[in-house]
Image (cartoon, rainbow, N blue to C red):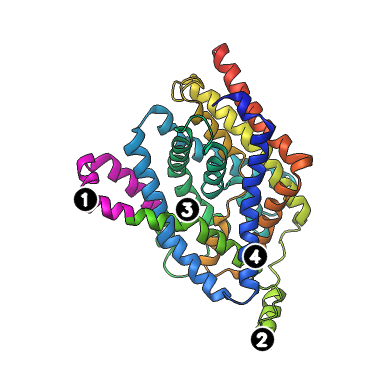
Amino acid sequence: LGLAHAVSPAVLATSAAAVAELVISVGIGFAVVQSGLIDQSAIAALAKIVYNVFVPIFLFTSVLRTVTTYGLSAGMLALPLVGMAQIFIGLAVSSLALRIAGITLTSPKSRRLIICSSFGNSGVLPLLLVEALFRAPYPDASVMPRAASYISFYLLGWSPVFWSVGSSILTGGGEEGGSKWSQAARKIISPPIVGALSGLCAALLVPRALLQARPVACVLTCLSSFARAYPATALLVLAGSLAGGAPSRSRSTGGAAETAVVEAEAEAPPVGGRRELSTWASLVSIMASRYLLSPAIAWSLIIALRKAGFFPPVAVDPVLTFVVLLQAAMPPAQNSVIMLQVVGDKLGAKKLSRMLFMLYLLAVVGDKLGAKKLSRMLFMLYLLAVVGDKLGA
């Protein structure tokens, strides 16, 4: 990748600009909702469309393109395992830390904190950053599509855990209708998971000639068009949830009264004498987890997998190492808001989206004070990977 180019001020500025682009996009969506052009019922309906249509198609096309283009290597097969391992280690550490601190684990606020600490934004933001970093005039034109493909393959392990385990934690496992077994089956066999696994099966089982045949190729092109709608619609759902319940000039008296009722619905206080973290303490905890603990976990996994022979040295495939470290340094997943929207938890979605907005905003505002240091830490880990590779680590 060219380490000297990677740690240049221009690259760091581009990284901050990519995060700023996401925050500005959310701000535009917020303005659209606040203006009354889109109401909360439309946002809830859009969240279900994203969950049931756009996310599965995005994962299907991404995984299919990755496997058919680059085949399957030991490093690629390790990517889903790395994604799942990062999540479960993060869940264990965050839950243990809350228990030691005497914080309840069952309140909605604690569940949101655990999810934000354990699940990074592994889809939209990494793709935006990769495009911003490696598009022309970057000298090696093959880096950007390879990095995007590795991100898609990483999602093959991340998505099933997120939409099953993550959904159970965030929503409290309290979906209506059916037994606990049927609820668990719906989460395990959810549309995003079906999309990812279908893409893998199609890539492995369908002959390449058939995929390139005109009728099938036409269908895949149409699906790719739907897949491109995923980032924008997911951002709009996040912005709509952020704007939900906020005062708006276009709202009627009845709407304002309904908003007041929703705001007055206090979440159940913690039981058993356990306390909860304040909002700022939660933000600090999430940032420490995402930007310190998660990269350390990723680095440890890379070293362990390399020694076991399941992960290539940096010199063989530097893009692979970069993608793993990039995923480890991502802010919390914005799709968490979609989860709450789908189950009808408007109050929880609004509170979570506001926390996410503050975290993303801090990543941009703190560029001069902290974001560059975090970016340098990411690339220092990459540098350690290079040095360790030379020393035979």
Q: Which of the two discs, 1 and 2, labels the residue nearer the N terminus?
A: 1
Point out the stretch of residues depicted in magenta.
193-221
Q: Residues within 10 Å of mark 1 (few under 14, many from 20)?
A: few
Q: Which of the two discs, 2 and 3, labels the residue nearer the N terminus?
A: 3
- Magenta span includes 211: yes
Of the pair 48 and 376, the residue shown nearer to us: 376
Q: Which residue is mark 4?
A: 242
Q: Distance of mark 4 from mark 3, alpha carbons? A: 24 Å
Q: Given this view, does label 1 or label 2 mark the residue nearer the observer?
A: 1
Q: Which residue is mark 1?
A: 214
Three-letter residue code for mark 1: Arg
- Give residue 164's mark: 3
Q: Distance of mark 2 from mark 3, alpha carbons? A: 39 Å
- Magenta span includes 152: no
Circle 1 — which element? Answer: helix
Picture residue at 57% right of the left edge, 38% below the top: 133
Q: Which of the two discs, 3 and 1, labels the residue nearer the N terminus?
A: 3
